[in-house]
Amino acid sequence: MENLKPENLAGTPWQEEYARIAPNPEDWPTLIAKVKQLNLHIPDWPAETIQAIKAPTLTIIGDSEIFRP
């Protein structure tokens, strides 16, 4: 993740869809920088904290995500 660059994802379904629907497709490098920071700084929450969340939650993983199930 530390070495992730926008060009690493060039031509992927994710990049192609971003280019198609984003109001500013030229901001692709900004999006990748933000995703990189998000993934590098994931909080380490203890299981008890997560289990204490009372709000309903839906997790969706698609076929074209960066990560695989």
Image (cartoon, rainbow, N blue to C red):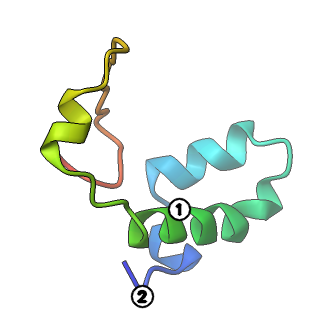
Question: From this viewpoint, is residue 4 visible?
Answer: yes
User: Crowding near pointer 2: few (<14 within 10 Å), some, many (20+)?
Assistant: few
In this figure, what is the number of numbered marks? Answer: 2
Crowding near the residue tagged with mark 1, few <14, some 14–19, many ≥20 C-alpha atoms within 10 Å: few
What residue is disc 2 on? 3
Residue 26 drawn at (x, y percent): 81, 63
Q: Give whichever of 45, 14 is nearer the camera.
A: 45
* Mark 2: amino acid: Asn
Q: Secondary structure at mark 2?
A: loop
35 or 49, nearer to the observer: 49
Marks 1 and 2, the one that precedes in the sequence: 2
| SS for dot 1 | helix
Residue 51 in the image, given as x and y percentages of width and height? 18, 29
Question: Can you give x and y, in whole percent of width and height, for residue 31 in the image?
Answer: 65, 61
| Kind of residue sitting beneath label 1 | Val
The structure residue drawn at horizontal position 49% and vertical position 49%, both measured from the top left corner, is 14
In this rendering, is residue 12 above or below 65? below
Residue at screen point 45% across, 80% down: 4
Residue at 32%, 15% (x, y): give it.
Answer: 54
Q: Is residue 10 visible to the viewer in this orientation of the structure? A: no
Q: Residue furthest bottom?
A: 3
> Relative to 25, does residue 3 appear above or below in the rendering?
below
Relative placement, left or right, of 47 versus 39 is left
In the image, residue 34 above or below residue 67:
below
Q: Residue furthest top?
A: 56
* Left or right of residue 40, residue 32 in this image: right
Q: Position of residue 35 (x, y in %)?
A: 53, 62
Residue bearing mark 1 = 35
Q: CA distance from mark 1 to mark 2?
A: 12 Å
